[in-house]
Image (cartoon, helix red, strand yellow):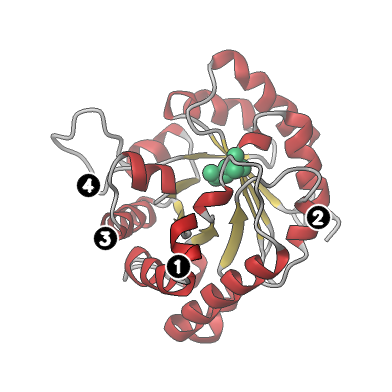
Amino acid sequence: MPRTLIAGNWKMNGLRADLSTLKEVAAALPPDQDNPEVLLCVPATLIASAADAAAGSPLRVGGQACHAKEKGAHTGDLSAAMLKDAGASHVIVGHSERRADHGETSAFVAEQAAAAIKAGLTPIICVGETLAEREQGQVSDVISRQIAESVPAEAQPGSFVVAYEPVWAIGTGRVAGPEQIAEAHGLIRKLLTDRFGAAASEVRILYGGSMNPANASEILQVENVNGGLIGGASLKAADFLSIYTAASAR
Ligand code: PGA
């Protein structure tokens, strides 16, 4: 089984004063390498100071998106190399909020993921169906297409992470049930195995969508769940640490 990854996604939340939350998380983590890997993906403005604040602790810092190009005339965008240079180790790509707010297609997500790998970052590639797609029985079609188109040709099993985030469960308090999660994660594992063979067992598949201290333990026990991508509950150190503790007890 791959090492569990507990990743927080602060989204567009966090001023410098909120680094106290990150410092609280960093200070609480034991140095033991067998423990779950812990990551906070903060707004780009905080990456450098967050990386400084986390230095010497096992806490890693990540970004939430990157441009596919290395540099150039792309006003307002950030390259993967810039995130890496600021101290990030990971970057979320293809989050449903980016797909919706910025029209990011799976092809563009694959380019971002390839750029991240090239820059030495681990991309967390997000997939997941909307409520309408679920109600129309399209879950496996949507996930299959997103995995085929969003995981770049450059990817190797150890170089990326997948997050299954049903759109209807994000920020809604409505969490997917264990059977729904098992089905989606099992499908993703199968798709990765079709592509990478037995080495696909190394790929971490995170669940994301209203994960919190009360439901983390149950979700993390579902087959093929190798960690979580946590939005709202990563903004409070106590909640995020309690999810980490649930993951450590697995
Ligand atoms: P949530 O967000 O935990 O607030 O639902 C998860 C995510 O969007 O990554």
Q: Position of residue 191 (x, y in %)?
A: 47, 79
| Tag 2 near tag 3, CB within 8 Å | no
> Where does the C terminus fall, quadrant-wise?
bottom right
> Observer-nearest residue: 174 or 191?
174
Which residue bears the numbered disc 2?
217
Which residue bears the numbered disc 4?
69
Vertically, is 101 above or below 156?
above
Q: Is residue 221 left or right of residue 133?
A: right
Vertically, is 149 above or below 176?
below
Location of ligand 1 given as a quarter of the image: top right
Q: Which mark is residue 175?
A: none
Q: Which mark is residue 107?
A: 3
Identified at 35% across, 63% down, the residue is 150
N-terminal label among 2 and 4: 4
N-terminal label among 4 and 3: 4
N-terminal label among 2 and 1: 1
Q: Position of residue 96 (x, y in %)?
A: 43, 48
State how far apart marks 4 and 1 are (Cα): 36 Å
Q: Is residue 231 left or right of residue 141?
A: right
Which three-letter amino acid code belongs to the residue tagged 4?
Answer: Lys
Identified at 36% across, 56% down, the residue is 113
Quarter assignment of residue 186:
bottom right
